[in-house]
Image (cartoon, rainbow, N blue to C red):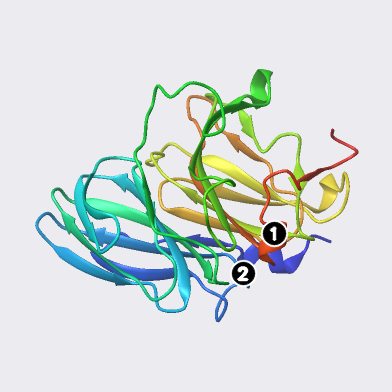
Amino acid sequence: MCDEAMKKWRVQSPEAMGFYPVVTPDKCACQVAQMYRLNLPEGAQYELFSETLEMHPVLISGKASLEQRILGRQGMERFDAFYIPAHEKAVIKAEEECVFYIGAASFEGIGEPHFRKFEKDLPIGDIHQIHGEGRGRREVMFTLAPQDSASRLICGLTWGEEGGWTSWPPHQHEKYLEEIYCYFDMPKPSFGFHISYAENGDVDNMVIHPVYSGTVVQAPYGYHPTAGSPGSQNKYLWVLAAFHPNVRRYDLAVSDPVRA
């Protein structure tokens, strides 16, 4: 039988204006990785307090401005991102209606505020990468890279091929990290699939979630490949959170030996 817990890993994040906890340990399977969503109408302002968390907002749509005591004033366009450690405040003003996906995790004393401008044409390297090949080829852009100062979080954007697969071959990193997938730019009737299964090669016990804009799927354990439907691309922000700062690494994924 399929893992019954996996059926509850899918959440559709709110589209109404406001700030929303989407994946938090009090109500979700993930106990380390957290995700919030901020929707602002044009002209609105929001004060984001990190409290005991490190937070990593990524502007998914629209245009905004940011003010923060260390980062100063920054204009924000699509896919720009910033990071604040615990006990910090950032003031966000929407220059256009905008949506932020916000990765978060408990702060462990490591991390300094920083801002990353999205550079579409950045050469392939530490931040801009190509993973996989063939129908499993995807483009990755780190928004919070392993070399950036943070306690638990590593985050980035992934664009799959049209009708292609991502996170392929299937992998898991359950000993060290949890992950959350936050889908965007897939308005219905476009859709994809997010697949979860616990054991090597156990195709008879998969849980398959339909995904589209605003869908959020947790991966606290198990393998988690995704596939776009024909004519669609899977696009998502992924939020990785380490169980401990000393395993905050991007190279700890273990591929399913049956599918690798």
In the rendered image, which residue does mark 1 sit on? 177
Q: Is residue 14 visible in the rendered structure shown here?
A: no
List the residue tagged with mark 2.
Answer: 32
Reply above or below: 16 against 95. below
Instruction: Give the farthest residue toward the top.
Output: 134
Label 2: how many Cα within 10 Å (few below 14, some 14–19, many 20+): many
Count of marks placed on residues? 2
Residue 228's spot in the image, x, y percent?
A: 56, 33
Kind of residue indicated by mark 2: Val
The answer to whether 16 appears left or right of 85 in the picture is left
Residue that appears at 55% across and 32% down: 229
Q: Compared with residue 11, is residue 96 higher up or lower down, i.e. above or below?
A: above
Q: Quadrant of residue 117?
A: top left
Above or below, 89 relative to 179: below
Q: Quadrant of the N terminus?
A: bottom right
Q: Are marks 1 and 2 in contact (CB under 8 Å)?
A: yes
Amino acid type at image mark 1 = Leu
- Which of the two discs, 1 and 2, labels the residue nearer the N terminus? 2
Label 1 and label 2: CA atoms lie apart by 8 Å
